Amino acid sequence: MQHRLFAALLKPRLPLTKALRLGRLVAAIVLPLLVCAGLVRAFAEESLHFRDPYTGQTGEEWEEVSTIHDDLTYALALAAGFSITDSITLQIWDQLVDSEQIGPGDAISYTNCAGGAFYPPPNPDEVCRFKPHSRVIWPMWNSMQDPDRCTTSRFGPYSPFFHFPHDNDRDLGALRDWAWGATDTLVAYEAYAWGGPAEFTVMQASCLYTRTAVITTGIQAGSLEAFATYLHTLGDAYSHRECIDLMDRLEMPWATHTLTGYPACNYNPLDPQPDDAHGREFGASPDAARTDEAIQAIYDELVQRSLQREGAYFPLDMDTPLPALSGTPTLRDSLYTFVHQWDFEHPEERRVWADEMAGAILSQRVPLRRVYVPLVRR
């Protein structure tokens, strides 16, 4: 459809002024639809670029990140008792669920796509009988960093599973079991959407289809990388909770962002606003309460993992004071400051505060001495 509209601008019989007006109309109508066909960014990437935790390098050529998934994950992992190295692993692999690949410019410094794979898509002629299906609406293969291997991509068929999960056994439960190593198999579902020439978004699509699948992630079940992937999705479950509930009520087979009049799901990643669904997750907005809940849930999981597996230090209680910070706030108070002191448009301040929290935590940690009782054989 958009090709015909733009072609109309080139016809000689169309006056220039009308052509310009039509061009603006096309941009106003078509582009937002294309943008919101399904871009998902729970705890949205902010106007803040990735900073390599090993080298400290950052700059405009690095990807934008979420201060929740990136900077705060490191501080939370330290507080939960992980070593600096393991905390960095958790930080990077949490952010990779969104980013897929991270590096300066065209370089790839970190990726979670190395061993991923997809199944051949279903045949729309078979699954969309008697429904328009000439246009592939979802997945958005061309928007992926690597459409052959990036299984956690926000644009791929597993996007609803990793980014709009339900808090049930099928979604979060399956991912948690895999992340903890209770199973080597990650069973999820794929999501597809097709439509006619005038349909551009998942909400408009005439044909929506899902199917169960075993995901080939290339990530070892039970590893820290797998656990970080789960932590990201756990956070997204809170970030997208109201949107997921709304889409369930609308009987949509999976949730997605949209600009069609549903505030719980309104978000345009090319034009983020402080009052959209993710902009409201910081500052004084009542919606920021779900960010507090997400952080608590993530920290609880980190503490459990630390005590049972990789932890090297005693986890800090939420009411533990942090004397190295001004005013000696507790860990709970410090996290509240991170969420509520600055709105969405001030990520730099959140990064600085997360750095100060990390430094304060490192200055007071107590090594965890594990006692191993040898087996006594008869």
Image (cartoon, rainbow, N blue to C red):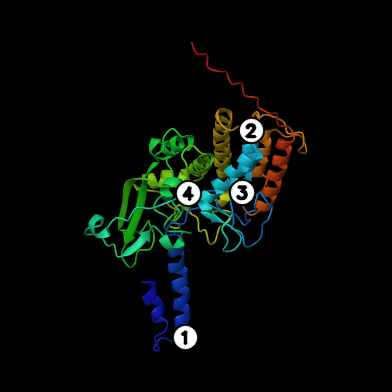
Q: Position of residue 305 (x, y in %)?
A: 55, 32
Callout in the foreground (1, 3) = 3
What residue does disc 3 label? 67
- Quadrant of the rendered image containing residue 138: bottom left
Identify the secondary structure beneath mark 3: loop
Label 3: few (<14), some or many (≥20) within 10 Å?
many
Q: Position of residue 375 (x, y in %)?
A: 53, 17
Give whichever of discs 3 and 4 has the lower sequence position: 3
Can residue 330 be seen here? The reply is yes
Left or right, residue 305 beside residue 16? right
Callout in the foreground (2, 4) = 2
Residue situated furthest top in the rendering: 378
Label 2: few (<14), some or many (≥20) within 10 Å?
many
Mark 3–mark 4 distance (CA, rounded to whole Å): 21 Å
Give whichever of discs 2 and 4 has the lower sequence position: 2
Amino acid identity at mark 1: Leu
Give whichever of discs 3 and 2 has the lower sequence position: 3
Callout in the foreground (2, 1) = 2
Residue situated furthest front in the rendering: 378
Q: Position of residue 87 (x, y in %)?
A: 62, 40
Give whichever of discs 4 and 1 has the lower sequence position: 1
Given residues 153 and 15, the one toward you in this image is: 153
Mark 2–mark 1 distance (CA, rounded to whole Å): 66 Å
Identify the secondary structure beneath mark 4: helix
Mark 2–mark 4 distance (CA, rounded to whole Å): 35 Å
Give whichever of discs 2 and 1 has the lower sequence position: 1
Q: Which mark is residue 81?
A: 2
